[in-house]
Image: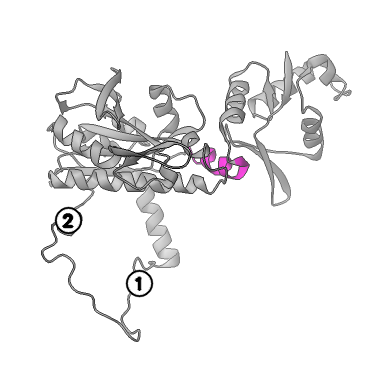
C-alpha cells in the first residue's frame, strides 16, 4: 500500500493552533509542526516501508494506526482510494485555483438548521443587535426626484409584482405545458451566433461570455403528461429525456425543507463550470456562473406566476444526494439552485 499527502489541503492559524482543512472532504484537523513536516515529506507516493524511515520511533503497529488515522482525516491519501480518484478528477477539471475551490466545495452539504432553529437564531440576533434596515430611503435628501408610477398600464411589471414565494402547495398536478413554459423561459435557446472563434447559443437570459453553463433536471412527482421520475431538459431541442425512474422525497434534496414535499415537481440547475473555464481562466468567472443562476431562476418564476403557480427557489441543496441521483462525477459540475413548481395553498 502506498500513501501521499493530500493535494487539497489548506492551512491557517486559529488562535494558538495551526489548522488544516481538506476542502474536498471538508475535514478539519489541528496540524502540529511535526505533522506538517511529515506531510511535506510525503509529497509523492511512498510505500509503508519507506514511510517507516520518517517515523523511526514508531512501532509497526503504531505506524499502521497513525497512517489509518491520517487517511481518515484526509491528511493522507491512500493509492487507488475514492479520495485519490476525487483528487485526480479535481486536478483534471478544476481551473480556477484553490481560493475559488475552497469556497465552492466547503459550502456544499452543510448542516442545515430547522425552521425553529432559524427563527430562534433570528430572535437572539434581534435581541442582541436590534433589527437591520432592509431598504434605504431618499426622504430627507436634497434633490429628490419622484419617478412616474411604474405599474400603471405595464403588463410585464404587473406580472412581476405578483410574484410571491408560497412554500405550501396543493395536492394538485401541474401540466406538462406549464412546466414547458417555465423551462423555456429560464433556459430555452432561441438561436445561435458566431464570434471570431466558435459558435455560441443565444438563450433567454444573459450568459457570461455566452458560455451557457447550466443544465436543468426535472424531478417530476405529479406532472400531467409525465411519468414520475427524473428528466434532463435539452434547452436546444426543448425536450425532456427520462434519466431515472427514482422519485425521492424532494425535501431530502433541499436540506430537509418539508414544504418541498407538497410540490408536484422541482427543477434543479446544475452548473457545468468547465464550459466557462474553457474561455475564462480568471477565477472571477466563478461569480459570473453563480449570478447566472439568478437570471434563470427569475425567468422560471415569472413564467410560473403567469399561470398562477408558485415557483419556490432555494439554494439549500443536499449536494451529494443530488449528484448521486444524477451520476455527477466531474467536480466542475455541481447543483447550484433549485425551484419547486406547484399551486399555492393559501390556507
Quick check: can you spot residue 50? yes
Q: Is residue 148 above or below residue 291?
A: below
Residue with the most extreme front position: 196
Please say which color scheme the image uses. Answer: one colour
Residue depth check, mark 1 versus mark 2: number of the one nearer the observer: 2
Q: Residue 311 lies in what quarter of the image?
A: top left
Answer few, some or many: residues within 10 Å of disc 1's Cα (few below 14, many 20 plus, some between 14 and 19): few
Of residue 218 and residue 238, the one placed in the foreground of this image is 238
Q: Which residues are magenta?
A: 97-109
Answer few, some or many: residues within 10 Å of disc 2's Cα (few below 14, many 20 plus, some between 14 and 19): few
Q: Which residue is mark 1?
A: 136
Magenta span: helix, strand or loop, mainly?
helix
Q: Residue 145 lies in what quarter of the image?
A: bottom left
Mark 1, secondary structure of its residue: loop
| Real-space Cα separation, disc 1 to disc 2, in angstroms | 25 Å
Q: Is residue 26 above or below residue 298?
A: above
| Picture residue at 17% right of the left edge, 56% below the top | 156
Where residue 76 appears, as percent x and y from the top left, is: 70, 26
Q: Which residue is mark 2?
A: 156
Where residue 335 appears, as percent x and y from the top left, is: 41, 34
Q: Is residue 343 above or below residue 326?
A: below
Of residue 78 and residue 143, the one placed in the foreground of this image is 143
| Picture residue at 43% right of the left edge, 32% below the top | 319
Quick check: can you spot residue 109? no
The total number of labels drawn is 2
State yes or no: residue 108 in magenta. yes
State yes or no: residue 284 in magenta. no
Amino acid at each position: 500500500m502506498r500513501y501521499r499527502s493530500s493535494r487539497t489541503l489548506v492551512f491557517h492559524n486559529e488562535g494558538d493552533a495551526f489548522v488544516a482543512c481538506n476542502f474536498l472532504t471538508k475535514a478539519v484537523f489541528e496540524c502540529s509542526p511535526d505533522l506538517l513536516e511529515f506531510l511535506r515529506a510525503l509529497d509523492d507516493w511512498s510505500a509503508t516501508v519507506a514511510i517507516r524511515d520518517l517515523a523511526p520511533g514508531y512501532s509497526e503497529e503504531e505506524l499502521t494506526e497513525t497512517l489509518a488515522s491520517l487517511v481518515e482525516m484526509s491528511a493522507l491519501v491512500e493509492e487507488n482510494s475514492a479520495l485519490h480518484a476525487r483528487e485526480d478528477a479535481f486536478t483534471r477539471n478544476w481551473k480556477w485555483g484553490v481560493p475559488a475551490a475552497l469556497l465552492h466545495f466547503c459550502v456544499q452539504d452543510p448542516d442545515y438548521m430547522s425552521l425553529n432553529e432559524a427563527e430562534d437564531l433570528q430572535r437572539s440576533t434581534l435581541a442582541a443587535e436590534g433589527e437591520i434596515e432592509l431598504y434605504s430611503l431618499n426622504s430627507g435628501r436634497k434633490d429628490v426626484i419622484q419617478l412616474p408610477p411604474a405599474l400603471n398600464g405595464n403588463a410585464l411589471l404587473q406580472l412581476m409584482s405578483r410574484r410571491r414565494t408560497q412554500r405550501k402547495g396543493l395536492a394538485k398536478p401541474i401540466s406538462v405545458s406549464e412546466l414547458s413554459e417555465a423551462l423555456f423561459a429560464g433556459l430555452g435557446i432561441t438561436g445561435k451566433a458566431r464570434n471570431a472563434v466558435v459558435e455560441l447559443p443565444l438563450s433567454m437570459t444573459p450568459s457570461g461570455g455566452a458560455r451557457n453553463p447550466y443544465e436543468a433536471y426535472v424531478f417530476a412527482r405529479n406532472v400531467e403528461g409525465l411519468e414520475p421520475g427524473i428528466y434532463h431538459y435539452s434547452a436546444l431541442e426543448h425536450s425532456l429525456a427520462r434519466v431515472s425512474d427514482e422519485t425521492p422525497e424532494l425535501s431530502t434534496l433541499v436540506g430537509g425543507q418539508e414544504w418541498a414535499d407538497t410540490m408536484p415537481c422541482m427543477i434543479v440547475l446544475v452548473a457545468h463550470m468547465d464550459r466557462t473555464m474553457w474561455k475564462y481562466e480568471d477565477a472571477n468567472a466563478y461569480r459570473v456562473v453563480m449570478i447566472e443562476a439568478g437570471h434563470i431562476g427569475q425567468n422560471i418564476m415569472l413564467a410560473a406566476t403567469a399561470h398562477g403557480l408558485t415557483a419556490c427557489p432555494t439554494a439549500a441543496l443536499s449536494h451529494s444526494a443530488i449528484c448521486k441521483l444524477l451520476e455527477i462525477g466531474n467536480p466542475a459540475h455541481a447543483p447550484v439552485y433549485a425551484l419547486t413548481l406547484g399551486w399555492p395553498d393559501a390556507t
